Amino acid sequence: MDTNEAMRRAVSNAGLSLRSASLALGRSENWLSSTLQRNGSSSGDTLASLGEVCGYSLALIPKGKEPEGALVIDPPSSEK
């Protein structure tokens, strides 16, 4: 999955709305929605901050060792 899809899933899995996640990050209420509509990837800082709001941690885990429920972001060359 790509970065934006991982962010959407984290918010959804946490039972949050995009608006409430944006506000929890100290951003405007439509910031996350706007961010997810753009092409490209978000920075690691943004992912870590959103992850924290949604109950996730950002970590690099050896391939094949991902725990169940992990949101795995594919490298850009293999995104579909």
Image (tube, rainbow, N blue to C red):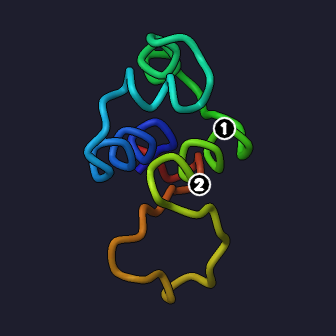
Please tell me which of labels 2 and 1 falls first in the chain: 1
30 or 8, nearer to the observer: 30
- Please report the residue visible at 50 percent of the width from the left and 61 percent of the height from the top: 56
Disc 1 residue crowd, few under 14, some 14–19, many 20+, Cα 10 Å: few
Residue type, numbered disc 1: Thr
Residue type, numbered disc 2: Pro
63 or 10, nearer to the observer: 10
Q: Could you tell whether 16 is left or right of 55 in the image?
A: left
The mark found on residue 46 in the picture is 1
Disc 2 residue crowd, few under 14, some 14–19, many 20+, Cα 10 Å: few
Compared with 80, 52 (above or below) is below
Image quarter where the C terminus lies is top left
Give how far across and how far down residue 47 sits, in percent. Answer: 61, 45
Give how far across and how far down residue 61 sits, in percent. Answer: 62, 79
The mark found on residue 9 in the picture is none
- Please report the residue visible at 63 percent of the width from the left and 34 percent of the height from the top: 42
Q: Could you tell whether 14 is left or right of 62 in the image?
A: left
- Secondary structure under tag 1 reads helix
Separation of residues labelled 2 and 1 (CA atoms): 17 Å
Give how far across and how far down residue 10 sits, in percent. Answer: 39, 49
The answer to whether mark 2 and mark 1 are in CB contact below 8 A is no
Compared with 64, 53 (above or below) is above
Q: Which residue is mark 2?
A: 75
